Amino acid sequence: MPNKTALRYLTNLLVFLFGGCGCPVTPVPTATQTPAPIAGLWTAQVEFGAIRFVMNAPGTGISRIEYDFSGQGMGGTGWNCGSQYVYGVFAFVPGGDDWPIQQGSFSISTTPPPGSPLKSILLQGIADASGSYATGTFRAVTKFEEPCWVAWSATPVQ
């Protein structure tokens, strides 16, 4: 006659290995795929003028950013950030690969051209679930360490 303890151990081991224990199963969460943002030119009208950026064809990166400090959003010709007056168009392209978009969001830090009253610009954003609308913040710091920020929302130009 077989050893009952060894048989019980073997039975429990087989149940453990091949299921059937009647234990509740915890579902394993699956990663949801965020749709890639629509490729092409996107535009956001803001108080200082406009933010324009180009999404690459796979929707995995941004290949160009342009800040238009025309002041059109305020009916003027420029923008006051702290004690500094900013005007003109600043355009940026990445030094290598496109700036990455991961799970619909991005954060891009750029340094304005020499002579600019701005020391740094940070553009952060996230695309919605449809990939056709994005929101975020634009943050600039002047050469005197004065921070300014603007909320934005953008859609692809059709």
Image (cartoon, rainbow, N blue to C red):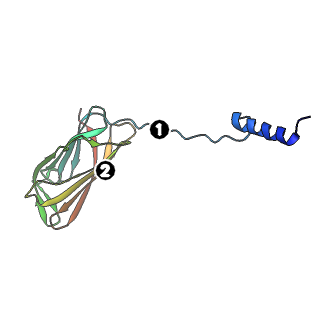
User: From the viewer's perspective, is residue 94 above or below residue 122?
Assistant: above
**Can residue 117 be seen at all in this image of the molecule?**
yes
Quarter of the picture containing the N terminus is top right
User: From the viewer's perspective, is residue 17 above or below residue 117?
Assistant: above
**Would you say 61 lies left or right of 9 here?**
left
Figure quadrant of residue 114 = bottom left
User: Which residue sits furthest left?
Assistant: 115
Q: Could you tell me the amino acid type at mark 2? A: Gly
Figure quadrant of residue 56 = top left
**Would you say 85 lies left or right of 122 here?**
left
Q: Which residue position is annotated with label 2?
A: 136
Q: CA distance from mark 1 to mark 2?
A: 22 Å
- The picture places residue 81, in percent across and down from the top left corner, at 17, 62
- Determine which of the numbered discs, if any, sits on residue 40 in the image: none
Q: Residue at x 88, y 39 (%)?
A: 3
Element type at marker 1?
Answer: loop
- Tag 1 and tag 2, C-beta contact below 8 Å: no
- The picture places residue 151, in percent across and down from the top left corner, at 28, 53
In front: 114, or 46? 114
**Can residue 21 be seen at all in this image of the molecule?**
no
In front: 114, or 55? 114
Q: Residue at x 25, y 58 (%)?
A: 149
- The picture places residue 109, in percent across and down from the top left corner, at 24, 52
**Would you say 4 lies left or right of 138 here?**
right
Q: Which residue position is annotated with label 1?
A: 32
User: Which residue sits furthest right?
Assistant: 1
Q: Earlier in the sequence, mark 1 or mark 2?
A: 1
In front: 17, or 99? 17
Element type at marker 2?
Answer: strand
Quarter of the picture containing the C terminus is top left
User: From the viewer's perspective, is residue 7 above or below residue 149?
Assistant: above
